[in-house]
Structures are given as C-alpha cells and as structure tokens.
Image (cartoon, rainbow, N blue to C red):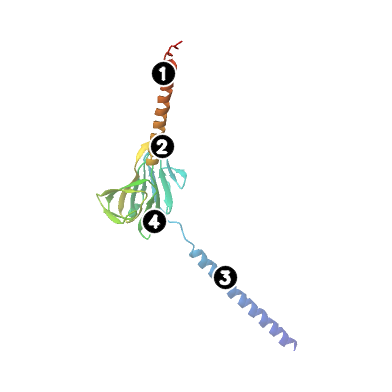
Amino acid sequence: MKSSYVKASLSLVLAVTVSSVFSLRSFAAVEATARSVQPIAQTCGTLAVKAGTVTVNGNIAQTGATVMSGSVVSTGSGEAVIDMGPLGRIELGDHTTATVICEGGSIRVRTNCDKTKVEVKTGQVAIETPKTETLSAGQTETYDGGINATAPAGVDVELECVGKKAAGGYVTGGLLGLLALIGVGAGVAIGVGLGEGDIASAPSSPTVP
C-alpha cells in the first residue's frame, strides 16, 4: 500500500515537472517571437554639411551624422547633402526643411516650404502633391507649397525652399504686404508732421482792427 502511494506521488511530481518545462519553453518562444517582430529603425544615409547650421530632428548635426528613416532635416543659411549610398542622394538648399523616409528600396520625401524647387540630376522623382507628375533627369520644377514625392534607388535630386529672402529667412507675400502697409503709414505720419510744422512756422495774418 505504501509502495503504491509513493509511486503515485512520484508520478504526480514527474507530470508537474514535465508540464512546467514545456510551459516555460512556450513562454520563452512567445517572448522571442515578440522581440523579433519589433520594428527596427532603418538608416537612410549620412549627412554632409556644406555650409551653415543644419539640424536633424531639431538637434544641431555635423558632417558624418546618421540620418534615420523619418528624420526631419533643416538647413539654415547653408546647404546639406544626405548620401544614401545605392538609394541615392538628396541635396537640400538653404532654409529648407525636408522629411526623409527610406522604405522598400525607395525614398519618400516631403518638404515644408512656401514654394519648393525640385531639380532632378539623375533618375526620376514622382511628385504626388501638390500635383501628380514625374520629373526625369535634367528637369527642374517649382511648386506652390510643400511637396510629397517618391523616388526609386539611384536618384540624385536637389530640393530647395525658394522665395524672396530677408535677413534670417524668407519674406512671404503677407509679410511684404505688412511691410508695405507700415511704409505707407510711416509716409503719411511724416507728411502730417511736415504739414503741421509748416502751419506752425507760417506767419499769422495780421488782425484787422
């Protein structure tokens, strides 16, 4: 009787042990699978600062900085180049902001400009907004506002925010209008001041008794 009890106990312990081993292996496999499907940030290319100050995601960057997919690259008074190896090359003119995304062997780029100049040196660039068209090597176009565009591997394109520039940036139409209005106001004020001065300095007419 005692021997049967011992055997039953050993069988129970063995069953629990085997079950625990398989459960732990299953949990480990699930955890490993979860880690394997986590997205990995993709490297787009390397930054080369030609002049001025350049930022990547709001942080000042130097030549040799890594540009990750989804990065926002902004130039100041200088220029920058993003060298993406086999994917291609993007050159940014001064005072230009662009978001660069690398996906599936192609490049997606969007700009934040009042006007965007696109110059294709090698390959093709498919413009999606503000209008749909494809630019080939040797073509240059300027678009109102920012653009959304895609390009296959091997492209060489220059992007630049264009417009009338003032010290430290661009002068938009609204700002030009404001400056003109201020100028008109100043002119009127000066004219009124001169008129009052003339009136004050003019001899008074003699009073008739």
Q: Amino acid at mark 2?
A: Leu
Residue pictured at 30% horizontal, 53% vertical: 155
Q: Which mark is residue 102?
A: 4
Mark nearer the N terminus (4 vs 2):
4
Q: Quadrant of the N terminus?
A: bottom right
What residue is disc 3 on?
27
Foreground: disc 1 or disc 3: 1
Point out the tag, 1 or 4, that comes first from the N-terminus.
Answer: 4
Most foreground residue, 168 or 207: 207
Q: Nearer the viewer, residue 109 or 20?
A: 109
Image height of 206 relative to 158, above or below:
above
Q: Which residue is mark 2?
A: 178
SS at circle 3: helix
Circles 4 and 2, Cβ within 8 Å, touching? The answer is no
Does residue 77 appear anywhere in the picture?
Answer: no
Residue visible at 39% across and 31% down in the picture = 184
Q: Is residue 104 left or right of residue 29?
A: left
Residue 26 figure quarter:
bottom right
User: Which is in the foreground here, disc 3 or disc 4?
Assistant: 4
- Whichever of labels 2 and 1 marks the residue nearer the N terminus, that label is 2
Q: Disc 4 residue type?
A: Cys
Please give the count of numbered marks on the rendered protein.
Answer: 4
Mark 1 highlights which residue? 198
User: Mark 3–mark 4 contact, CB under 8 Å?
Assistant: no
- Please state which amino acid type lies under the numbered disc 1: Asp
Q: Nearer the viewer, mark 2 or mark 3?
A: 2
Work out how far the residue at label 3 is from the one at label 4, CA to CA, in angstroms: 34 Å
